[in-house]
Amino acid sequence: MKAEFEMVHGTMNVIQPHETNWINNSTSVNPLFPKPVSDLSQWVEHITKQLIDDLPETVTTTADTLQTAATSGDQYFIPSSHSGEFSPRKASRKNYGDDTSADRADYELQWGNELQLHAENSRRARGLSKLDQHGLTLITLLFECAVAISVENPGEAHRMLLELTQMASPYGPSCAERVVAYFAKAMSSRVLNSWLGICSPLVNYKSIHSAFQVFNTISPFIKFAHFTSNQAILEAFHRRDRVHIIDLDIMQGLQWPALFHILATRMEGPPHVRMTGIGTSSEVLLETGKQLSNFARRLGLSFEFHPITRNFGDHLDTSMVQVRRGETVAVHWLQHSLYDATGPDWRTMKLIEELSPRIVTLVEQDMSHNGGSFLDRFVGSLHYYSTMFDSLEAYLPSDNPNRHLVEHCLMYREINNILAIGGPARSGEDKFRHWRSELGASNSFMQVGMSGNSMAQAQLILNMFPPSNGYSLVQGDGTIRLGWKDTSLYVASAWTCSHASSR
């Protein structure tokens, strides 16, 4: 499939910054029960919180771990649906799994009882429909299964997974059923891997890229990443004649034609543009380079493309990137969980530092999935992907083939990498929970606040999608966050290398 480059009328021009930092068009909710039953993500959040509150004192450590996972990070911003502001939550992270096997067995039994009791109380209290009752039952059983896996009881986990696979289908009519089906499949892979040894599934990069392109058309999240980053890069390239963009995961290069268009028509004249595109498929890279070169030629923009074929996380040194003297360097990274990345993150950090970029644009999924225990990652990812599925359901019906393509080829692959493959124990390599925190703690990088123009770009993108009352934007701490309802999903930030002044 050839890439259809994205151009949005009115974007990437100089736009006056918005005065308000928080934009949330969410509809009002019942203050007595602020979590609508119709949203799966809010079911998950409510059930998790209730279960943590109900847990006995003997398992407080894991309750704290779950609470931390539910907030997805050291400091997680959750906008208020009433006041229009946002406030930080902070929780201390504790380790899980230090108890004995007998304690774990008791803990598992207590959790199972609490889950079943809570599910029954919820059904009676809310008078749920049959479809909602089925979804609540599935989520409850999925939680029980996650606990069994976390206390290393694969036999019991396998029994529950067999039950879940018979009850939940990825083609089901409800978000709950579809999410549970994909989580159960990923957890089945984890249980199987624990018996047979760790293995990584084969990757069909063409199907991933095709689904990624569809996701770009049916949801604002990818466009948000592209256009906020483009604005930051455009500002860093002001009055620069020779620029070099290094995309650490270029895929089909959908992001760049919009930036090329503005660079080709800027008042001080167009710069010479070099682009280094790093990707996993040489075939896709060559096609991407061809498409970008043709687009640049039509604009009259001087352009060079340099492809580097590397599996994500493989060692890469600066000699392969070939930065030339006098170039202003921009490094862009849209992070995701689609690949089973190998190699320690400090090596990638060292590469970026050695490139001495004038600007680093980073867009991260707003969840912590690279570290912690299995239960930690399970709760955080369940809440995150439940929210993603909710946002897709607001735009497309359950039988829409594009929605299924995105859920199956993108969402499930990420869920599988986080639960079945992910985790520091897999390879013993250090992974960063949040890259922006690591960059902020480094002496080599300084944060560049996302400008009001970047915020305006994000709002323009948001206006293109019909369920605008569900999406939310937050600008604060130098970042811009895009979320669904009260859950932040993607965070855009920009950084500069402290010794990049000579470029």
Image (spheres, rainbow, N blue to C red):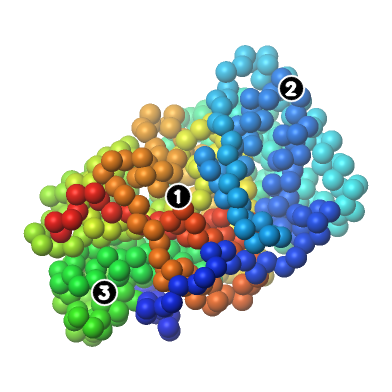
Image position, residue 405 (x, y; %): 53, 64
Image position, residue 235 (x, y; %): 30, 69
Going by the image, does 497 lie left or right of 136?
left
Label 3 Cα neighbours within 10 Å, binned few <14 / some 14-19 / many ≥20: many
Identified at 57% across, 64% down, the residue is 22
Label 2 Cα neighbours within 10 Å, binned few <14 / some 14-19 / many ≥20: few
Q: CA distance from mark 1 to mark 3?
A: 26 Å
Going by the image, does 333 lie left or right of 132?
left
Where is mark 1, residue-wise?
337
Tell which residue pokes out farthest to the front in this image: 19
Identified at 80% across, 30% down, the residue is 113
Identified at 60% across, 29% down, the residue is 150
* Vertical position of residue 277 compared to residue 423: above or below: below
Identified at 18% across, 70% down, the residue is 240
Instruction: Please identify the quarter of the rendering in which residue 112 is found.
Output: top right
Pick the front one: 114 or 212: 114
Pick the front one: 127 or 176: 127
Mark 2 residue type? Glu
What SS does tag 2 mark?
Answer: helix
Image position, residue 149 (x, y; %): 61, 30
Between discs 1 and 3, the one toward the N terminus: 3
Where is mark 2, residue-wise?
57
Q: CA distance from mark 2 to mark 1?
A: 35 Å
Mark 3 residue type? Leu
Mark 1 residue type? Ser
Q: Nearer the viewer, mark 2 or mark 1?
A: 2
Between discs 3 and 2, the one toward the N terminus: 2
Instruction: Please identify the quarter of the rendering in which residue 296 is found.
Output: bottom left
Where is mark 3, residue-wise?
292
